Amino acid sequence: MKKEIPKKHRNDIILIACVLLVAAVGFVYLNFFRSEGNTVTVTVDGTEYGVYSLSENRTEDIYTGGDNQHHNRLVIKDGKAYMETASCPDGICVAHKPVFRDGESIICLPNRVVVTVDLADETETPDIIM
Amino acid sequence: MKNKSKSVAFAGICVALALILAYIEVLLPPLFSAVPGIKMGLPNIIIVFLLYRRGPVFAGIVSLLRILLVSMLFGNVMALLYSLAGGILSLAVMVILKKLNALSPVGVSVAGGVTHNVGQIMMAVLLLDTVQIGYYLVVLAITGTIAGIVIGLCGVLLVKRIPQKLI
Ligand SMILES: [Zn+2]
């Protein structure tokens, strides 16, 4: 029994090291190797709600759910997007740091709202971007 | 604890304890406030303890009841679906790893903590129809590991300290 314990602990450490290594690689990639985006796309329940430029400051109130009882306020300021207030019980989306890199997103799980930063082609019909 | 009604009563106490831990977690300020969505998964202490003391079936029943009740009290239908996905996946992984006998309870608990988060994210991908969740997985892998270590150590302590004949 005594001999078995160190081996298991070694395996524990290997497992923890592997998980943290994968996470660290992912973290470094996500934070340092991605270019900045220029638009944010809001989807509700998987369908597109709106596309907004990151270069213009604006506040967008997003109402979702039956009777529009859910609410999220998305703010775009100084090239970054963040959730200012939300009706969701967990408040995770509000606590999320502002996003601005291509592919970054803020997800409000309870209200099923997803805000994603994209790198849209500048030359491609910029009028559509609100 | 061969007695059936005694087992049922014990399961009830465990569910109640898990509920109290879930409530404490709701009251606590987010541990790593810079990072969203961080929950220690305190009720999992009970689940890890039960897995080692009473086996997978008992732990599974208590876990399921706990998830249903916590979602009804503090969450909504969406929260229930996420919790179910996370709870079932993590318990399944922990049961398999415990059977393989290659990890200590702490390692098993770490795997459970990480897969608990992975399960929730997978359900979110299904429901929200989006794959823009890489950031969440990274953060949740780290916090799941930390939570798993703490919970595993607590679980081991409980298994060691609570006399066998008591439960
Ligand atoms: Zn939210």
Image (cartoon, coloured by chain):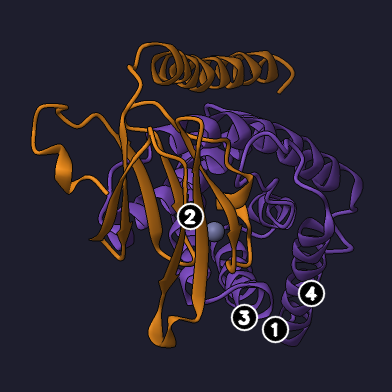
Chain colours: A orange, B purple
Please tell me which of labels 1 and 3 falls first in the chain: 1
Identify the element where label 3 is drawn.
helix
The 10 Å Cα crowd at callout 1, few under 14, some 14 to 19, many 20 or more, is: few
Q: As shown in the figure, which amino acid type bears the numbered disc 3?
A: Met
How far apart are the alpha carbons under marks 1 and 2?
A: 29 Å
Do callouts 3 and 2 mark residues in contact (Cβ within 8 Å)?
Answer: no
Q: Nearer the viewer, mark 3 or mark 2?
A: 3
Q: Nearer the viewer, mark 1 or mark 3?
A: 3
Please tell me which of labels 4 and 1 falls first in the chain: 1
Give the quadrant of the N terminus of chain A: top right
Seen in the image, is B109 located left or right of residue A40? right
Identify the element where label 2 is drawn.
helix
Q: As shown in the figure, which amino acid type bears the numbered disc 4?
A: Ala
Residue B164 spot, x, y in % from top left: 84, 55
Q: Kindly identify which residue carries mark 3.
A: B72
Q: Kindly identify which residue carries mark 2.
A: B86
Identify the element where label 4 is drawn.
helix
Same subunit, labels 2 and 4: the answer reads yes
Same subunit, labels 4 and 3: the answer reads yes
* Relative to A4, residue A44 above or below: below
Q: Kindly identify which residue carries mark 1.
A: B4
Query: How many numbered circles are shown?
Result: 4
Seen in the image, is B162 located left or right of residue A87? right
Q: As shown in the figure, which amino acid type bears the numbered disc 2?
A: Gly
Q: Kindly identify which residue carries mark 4.
A: B16
How far apart are the alpha carbons under marks 3 and 2?
A: 16 Å
Q: Nearer the viewer, mark 4 or mark 3?
A: 3
How far apart are the alpha carbons under marks 1 and 3?
A: 27 Å
Ligand 1 shown in quarter: bottom right
Nearer to us in this view, B61 or B141: B141
- Identify the subunit bearing mark 1: B
